Amino acid sequence: MQQTVSSAFSVSGIGLHSGDQTRVTVIPSEHPTGRYFVRIDLPEKPQIPAQVSAVEQTLLSTELGIGSAKVRTVEHLLAALVASGVDHVRIEIDGPELPLLDGSAKVWVENITRVGLTSIASSELPRVTLDKPVWIQQGDAFVAALPAASTRFSYGIDFPTKAIGNQWYSWHPDTESFAEAIAPARTFALASQIASLQQAGLIKGGSLDNALVCDHQNWLNPPLRFNNEPVRHKILDLVGDLSLLGTIPRAHFLAYKASHQLHVQLAQIIKE
């Protein structure tokens, strides 16, 4: 038996990059459909599968698309769904980007927990097993998947700011819940980069209410939810990007200074 949400729920908010207000409604699937988006604001309401084959671009978020229909910044909701055990679900959205909310997956997890899950009859999901390490590297940044007895995510980041610095964290889903250890971790940004990103047409909806921001020395909007909240958020992003495989393989995922681009490239290698 596989799972979907027991009832529908809706969440509204501002998109990080577009700055547009959108409404997302997560709806139970009666059949084994996988996780997929529906652009209800477009003619014919095109469907976009939450699959690695649908990735369009990965600049500061993950965007999926089919034809001219796009949906951006999908990683936080997808991480919440896969970590909560939601295999099949219809996600309706009335715009091109999911709301950032508070910058984490906390609101998504809370809503999934509130409505609960229900089982649906289905054949077994195809599962990928690794018999050898696979990895992708770009400069000193990399992400790898190593054969392992159980699933674990280990991540490292290194920023030339005192506020962030060098952080490592290893999360084991069997010993720490996603809802408590990973979902509350918010996205983060360097104050020195904000102006250039906005000039490039990005982070139009970013604010101190939906992202952690730091200068060279300090956080501009403390307190942090964890002393290593930034690296925990990177694990959140990695889980969301790997969810595009349908099911996340049993492996030890190890990343350092990686990005959505590298996460998705690893998923593509695993799929192949």
Image (tube, rainbow, N blue to C red):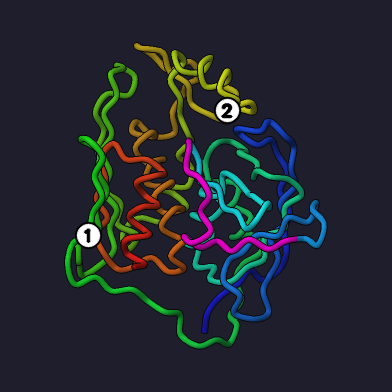
> Does residue 48 belong to the magenta stretch?
yes
Tag 1: amino acid? Val
Q: Nearer the viewer, residue 238 or 112?
A: 238
- State left or right for residue 36 relative to residue 149: right
Q: Earlier in the sequence, mark 2 or mark 1?
A: 1
| Label 1 neighbour load within 10 Å: few <14, some 14-19, many 20+ | some
Real-space Cα separation, disc 2 to disc 1, in angstroms: 32 Å
Q: Position of residue 147 (x, y in %)?
A: 20, 66
Check the image and report above or below for 122 versus 26: below
Tag 2: amino acid? Leu
Check the image and report above or below for 95 versus 178: above
Residue 243 position by quadrant = bottom left
Find disc 1 in the rendering and name its residue: 134
Q: The residue tagged with tag 2: helix, strand or loop?
A: loop
Residue 174 position by quadrant = bottom left
* Image quarter hosting the C terminus: bottom left
Q: The residue tagged with tag 1: helix, strand or loop?
A: strand
- State left or right for residue 30 relative to residue 195: right
Name the mark on residue 202. 2
- Seen as rendered, the residue at the extreme front is 67
The residue lying at 54 percent from left, 46 percent from top is 106
Query: Magenta residues, as a range?
Result: 46-59
